[in-house]
Image (tube, coloured by chain):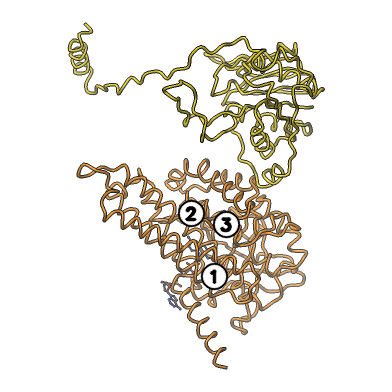
Amino acid sequence: MDYFFTEEQQMIRDTAREIAEKKIVPVRAELDEKGEFPTEIMKTCAESDLFGLYIPEEYGGFGGGIYENVIAIEELSRACIGVSVSFAGSGLGAYPILLCGSEEQKKKYLPQIASGEKLAAFGLTEANAGSDAGGVQTTARLDGNEYVLNGTKQWITNGGEAGIYTVIAITDKNKGARGASCFIVEKCTQGFSFGKKENKMGIRASATRELVFEDCRIPKENIIGKEGIGFIVAMKTLDNSRPGIAAQGVGLAAGALDAAIDYARGRIQFGKPIISIQAVQHMLANMAVQTEAARALTYAASKYIDSGAKSISKESAFCKLFATDIAMQVTTDAVQVFGGYGYMKEYPVEKMMRDAKILQIYEGTNQIQRNVIGQALIKESAKKRR
Amino acid sequence: MRLIVCIKQVPATTKVKINPETNTLIREGVESIINPFDTYALEEGVRIKERMGDGVVTVLSMGPPQVESALKESVSLGADEGILLSDRAFAGADTLATSYALSMAVKKIGDFGLIICGKQAVDGDTAQVAPELSERLDIPFVAYVRKIVEITNEKAVVERMTDHGYDVIELPLPAVITVVKDINEPRIASLKGKMRARKAAITVWTAKDVQADEELIGLSGSPTKVIKIFAPKSRGKGVSITGEPPEIVDTLYGHLKDGHII
Ligand SMILES: Cc1cc2nc3c(=O)[nH]c(=O)nc-3n(C[C@H](O)[C@H](O)[C@H](O)COP(=O)(O)OP(=O)(O)OC[C@H]3O[C@@H](n4cnc5c(N)ncnc54)[C@H](O)[C@@H]3O)c2cc1C
């Protein structure tokens, strides 16, 4: 379907598509097999100016919004979401600075992220704090002109690869949700190290590691906003980044659909290509409709957020939930269309199906997305009644 | 130093079809691209500029007005400017007339250090224009360069690919070289490059602008006469014989006998 992209948006799509086809497709199986981080591809994304799409021009970015970023993520995801999450993860790490950082912080860090010179990462999750972010135990204590961080973050995308980390830590245990704060920590700070790379089911090209803080001292001015607003920063960040995960779902589904159609045209059974069998056509038709619906919702939500709308949690959750559930469905159906060949590593769809699962888990599980939507519905209804 | 890269717009090869009645290329609806070998020439030009820290990359092409899109694409890939030689009088040129027209344009451009071309164009496959251009300009020429080892304003040291290895050649500048695929991996156009290309103005020169002798350009300047173009008959599918060597020999022998070849 034609979404009437501007000339600039078409350029972004074409650039990302060229990278996907020329640089990602030829190596994706190997990166997956070896669990190797796509350093070269990240460099190409940087040289092609893709890292700063949503960052204002004054900080070295392209001056677009979430929509522009979503277009790029979707195209990269058609080829491999293990690669695209490394790209999108940098945006996730940058949003706390972009949305809530001081002018000095923006000037210092955003140009490095926009140019792709450094990747960013976002550290919220811990062993005992997943869906329940309130369970964070990492602490930050003010000591003179420095904060001292202690604790361990778990499963952080781009851990070890990123140069800039935005991290949630507790500054006042007694204040509950108002006791958390967000900090910028640079790689190579003393007392900051990484755990081993996790061995994952899917998105194996991406790096997922622990962030370990042992009396890690950072300058006082590295706090984002002020003490106590850590969870507000985190929620705002996730509201803005979730359309990117939706875009991963859309791209992944589109890639799986393409592969399934190509295969069904070539595979002969009962003396004819299986695509001429109506049962197969119906599967493909469902996959196509679902993918297009997910794309339309993701674009609409992105544009809505870019419009400057105030309450965006529901719309953001809408697209993340829908597009990622559909990615799981469509990739599973793609394997079905391939039959036994789809189960083999010689074809790309088994990887796509393995990869898809994470989309329903990270940046808030899809159960949590439903909670977010449910709460928004209650709030909206209460407002109307008043 | 000014680097001049000569490019040609060609039909995307895999899609070229020949009209069986007229034996001419069907060009309608066929996408045009920059001759793939020329993309390596352009990339090398941009890399030399980056390596030397300054310079100008000028892309030069002769062709119809729509070639402007290829020159704009070159700007998106790092060229500083594009010059298009376009004039009805240039039409129908063979390699001799093309190299003459290009040489006149190069003279108009003036000072330059190196002219880089692709090893050949994928439509004509002659590999003649670049050496002819060096003759016309009376400067050194090296073909099939796979690496530029060293380059200064005065000279270049290059590796020329041969069948069995490579030659290392030092040549004074200005000069003309053609490059092979091994020399680099062309970059993907950046967004900033594409934005720059969108605004770039492509200079168009006519035959008069470059003071070309009308007898030496276009059809009248082209001694090559195309008598006939034809598509070779397709040979049909070959037979593949597998198995242990003795079996293969037996089967092959059977085939040859059955076919009354032996
Ligand atoms: C590969 C990978 C990369 C990641 N990258 C990052 C990163 O970069 N930064 C970061 O901070 N985190 C990251 N995470 C963490 C991720 O966001 C969490 O895994 C996710 O939020 C879920 O938390 P959990 O795994 O602890 O599951 P749990 O919270 O233990 O949930 C287990 C199950 O219970 C359900 N559940 C829990 N609570 C509720 C509830 N209230 N209502 C309904 N259902 C509920 C969940 O939906 C789920 O099905 C990453 C995780 C993975 C696997």
Which dot, 1 or 3, sits closer to the camera?
3
Count of marks overlaid on the render: 3
Q: Residue at x 63, y 73 (%)?
A: A309
Residue picked out by circle 2: A81
Which dot, 1 or 2, sits closer to the camera?
1
- A31 to the left or right of A109: left
Name the one closer to the observer, A316 or A117: A316
Where residue A282 appears, as percent x and y from the top left, is: 31, 57
Badge 3 crowding class, 10 Å Cα cut-off, few under 14, some 14 to 19, many 20 or more, is few
Which dot, 2 or 3, sits closer to the camera?
3
Where residue A299 appears, as percent x and y from the top left, is: 54, 63
Shown in orange, the chain is: A
Residue picked out by circle 3: A4
Residue picked out by circle 1: A316
Same chain for labels 1 and 3? Say yes or no. Answer: yes
B64 in relation to A155, above or below? above
